[in-house]
Image (cartoon, helix red, strand yellow):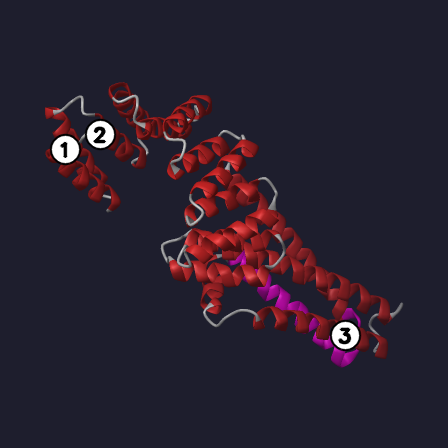
Amino acid sequence: MTTAPGTAAVLERAEALRQLGRLDEAERTLREALAGEPDDPDLLGALGWVLYVADRHAEGLAAAEAATARAPEDARHHLLRAVLHAALGRHDDAVAAVGAAGSLAPQDPGTARTRARVLAAAGRLREAGDAARHAVALAPESSAAHLLLADIADDLGDRRTARRAYEESLRLDPQNAVARHDLAVLDVNTRHPARALRGLVEAGTLDPTLPIVLRTITVVLWKLSWRLRMLFVVATIACVAAAGPAPDASTWSARAAASVALLVIGLLVRRTVRTLPERTRPAVRAALRADGPLRFTYLAITVCAVLFLAVAVTGVGVFAALVWLVLGLLGALAMVVGLARRFRRT
């Protein structure tokens, strides 16, 4: 179907306004045009997309249904119906609509990507993975296609495929902040916190508007604090055992155990810090400023290190025993914070 010149200009203006986030103006532009051309499927479809972005999904679906009724051979309108049905939680209808779009445009990469997203939202992850691979096959140079495959593979627990796809997405588009962020999250989940911190800072540098970056850095710092606490637990057991039945007595064995523990913990911390670029440190400081319990946790960990230093200098094992009190306090704090944040999300 050929779009009239006047309609093409309206669509171009509405799309520009939508891209700028000026949704009210975009909607007004389209409704004014529809007053003169109420049956134009392109105008109806464009209105549906604007309403979708504005989170007015029921109204957007009505526009999409009207556009589809007037141009049932246009796959774009079926895709719009699919994403709106999915947004409304009508996943069976969404899958049916995206299937209709796929039959009309089987070689269109955008259609394949939307099909993968709709299937994933419906919980049909295996089919979504197949659809994402099809999207990559149709557009192997598309960073977005590889990113979608990576996200679905990660949801499926196939982290090897996810990592390869994230890396390929970044090779094709090194400025893709979302891909960089999601790869960093994968590093968090595969226990590479230093690499994750570096990736998160890079994602924030690429797109400072990503608020999720600071939240994920906070998660990484909590995971690092757990690792340090576990090291102190092992070290405390070793020091108390080395002090013998009289932990208040000065013993060379307690001093040696504390010195070894401090050396091991210090080397691990140094190794982690050395892998972080300079620009990571402001992000870490920002995360600590934004999270009071996290800031207190790292202060308490510093106190543990000072207590171990006291054991190494004096040989008095009771200082190591005091670490138990600090670690117990941190454990209680972590439980309270975890419960409070879980309650806040529900």
Q: Are marks 1 and 2 in contact (CB under 8 Å)?
A: yes
What's the residue at 26%, 21% (across, down)? 66
Circle 2: element type: helix
The residue carrying pointer 3 sits among few (fewer than 14), some (14 to 19) or many (20 or more) residues within 10 Å by Cα, namely: some
Which of pointers 3 and 1 lies earlier in the amino acid sequence? 1
Pointer 2 residue = 42
Per the model, the C-alpha gap separating discs 3 and 1 is: 76 Å
Percent position (x, y) of residue 343?
A: 53, 39
Residue sitting nearer the eye, 102 or 50:
102
Q: Which mark is residue 120?
A: none
Whether residue 268 is visible, yes or no, is yes
Q: Which residue is mark 1?
A: 7
Disc number at residue 260?
A: 3
Query: Magenta span: helix, strand or loop, mainly?
Result: helix
Q: CA distance from mark 2 to mark 3?
A: 72 Å
Task: Please provide the residue range marked out in magenta.
Answer: 292-318
For image coordinates 43% across by 35% down, the residue present is 112
Q: Amino acid at mark 1?
A: Thr
Three-letter amino acid code at the position of disc 2: Asp
Choose top left, top right, bottom left or bottom right for residue 321: bottom right
